[in-house]
Image (spheres, grey):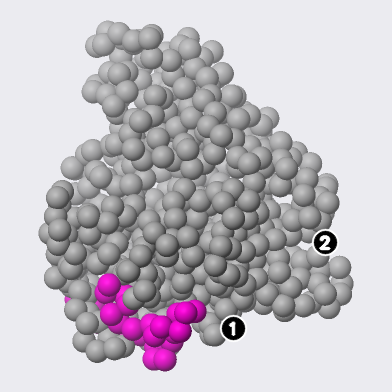
Amino acid sequence: MRFSRISTFASVAAISVLALSGCGGGTAGGGETDSSAIITADSVEPQNPLVPTNTSENGGGVVVGSIFSGLIAYDEDGKPQNDLADSIDSDDNQNWTIKIKKDKKFTNGEPVTAQSFVDSWNYGAAVKNAQSGANFFSPIEGYDDVSKEGSEEDKMSGLQVVDDNTFTVKLKSPQSDFNLRLGYSAYVPMPESAFKDMKAFGENPVGYGPYKMAKEGAWQHNTQIDLVKNDDYDGPQKAKNGGVTFKLYQNPDTAYQDLLANNLDVLQQIPTSALGNYKDDLGDRSLDEPYAGNQTIAIPYYLKNWSGEAGKLRRQALSMAIDRDEVIKVILNGTRKPATDMTAPVLEGYKDDVKNSENTKFDKDKAKELWEQAEKIQPYDTSEKFTVAYNADAGGHKKWVDAVTNQIKNNLGIEAEGKSYSTFKEVRTDATSGKLTGAVRSGWLGDYPSLYNFMEPTYTKGANSNDSKYDNPEFEKKLDEGLQAKDKNAANKAFQEADSMLLEDLPAIPLWYQQANMGWSESVSNVKASWNGTPMYFDVEKSS
């Protein structure tokens, strides 16, 4: 996710992230580092083959983000830097001219050209390719033609190749943060060979980035994914190590024990079970800092009890029945901050007192009152037990899910419990296909540093990560108003108003803002969290 020059509109209209603390590890063991050494890191089995336009979850995202680079990269604080882009220009935020750097090649030797970008974006947008990231291309003119149900069209009219190193983008309307989005993985280029057999490409992807697949078959499913340094990459994220082996864990506690034994170099999130003691265990080999991420519980509108006016009252009651402070203190050892909205505090434009934020405050009596109001409109169908689905293979979610559902049970008098899925892939499959039988652990990790990015992919109609299947045209109209604003203050105001709509309807219940609680072994140094909380693997150094 990724300056000879970025259009001056970036500083005027883009919504950017505020600087984070940027703490990192010191020298590994006080010894010399080996730039050819392979580091090991934890992850989970990706949901889908590793196609950038079809990767929208963290298991695949950390790999895709390591193999592929796009027009821009984001630095540690979320500021954009040119990567493959030489310039990104617009006079009106609607018509863009993009020039890419010359003589860049994919790791299979194919040239990176303007056509590479246009082909990749068209592929991602076309409905016949069923890509989860398709919605990221929705602002481009012609998207509606290629994305409508049953369409065989696969070329958006808003994309035109000028020459090998230049292409133009015409949007349906001005978009205040379009250029800021272009570091997200959906916008990276793929080589011409990818389109001949995308299934095979997803198993052994080829990109232009800090790393490449170690060999064909480097993805050993449910075991590990082996990446090695791409010596030909010369962008802002050039690797300081020889590669990354992602170990795919079924249990986060196992990953933590491997870290303590120095059998794992980088652990991207300390499991819940170790939050009380990891700082004692690891000392200065850990960090704890905020990032652009949140945790929520999404409640699908297709469930019996959670639609209409009664459903809206129940959502508000449920939110007020949760004592976030207690869960954070007792279960999460104070490593989170209670959420009062649907975005994240590190983003420019965030407000902790957005209208309707009172719906996130613990108030047991008010919760019961709202529940009773809902009962008068439509009695609660007790045949549908309230459950919260979560994955058991990462993050240690069981403890907090159990705590939250117990609070709901005790404070509202309804049956509530967690529902465990073995893997993240399985729970995401049910969520995206609309087959959940209850609520689901949800939330968002920023794709690019903008308030808009925390709402559009998760709460607009048809968006792949809209787990609740929320549909509110007035909300989407307000988002569009923010995108078309002439300056960032006006844009932020519109986005805040959209945020307040979500806090009234509560398609998802905000729980807390995330912290990067990361740990590393005695063998590595210079471990840092990026603006969105993922480790900056390319910066990690390992002792010889």
Residue under label 1, please give it: 231
- The answer, for residue 96, to whether it is visible in the render is yes
Q: From what the image shows, is residue 33 above or below residue 531? A: below
Instruction: Identify the residue at image location x=57%, y=42%.
Output: 337
Rounded to the nearest angstrom, the CA distance separating label 1 from label 2 is 26 Å
Q: Is residue 166 magenta?
A: no
Task: Tell me: 261 left or right of 113.
Answer: right
Q: Which residues are magenta?
A: 95-119
Task: Tell me: 418 left or right of 461.
Answer: right
Instruction: Identify the residue at image location x=27%, y=24%.
Output: 307
Residue under label 2, please give it: 522
Q: Nearer the viewer, residue 408 or 254?
A: 254
Specify few, some or many for label 2: CA neighbours under 10 Å numbering under 14, 14-19, or 20 or more.
many
Which amino acid is tagged 1? Asp
SS label for mark 1: loop
Instruction: Identify the residue at image location x=56%, y=73%.
Output: 211
Q: Is residue 115 magenta?
A: yes
Q: From what the image shows, is residue 211 above or below residue 359? A: below
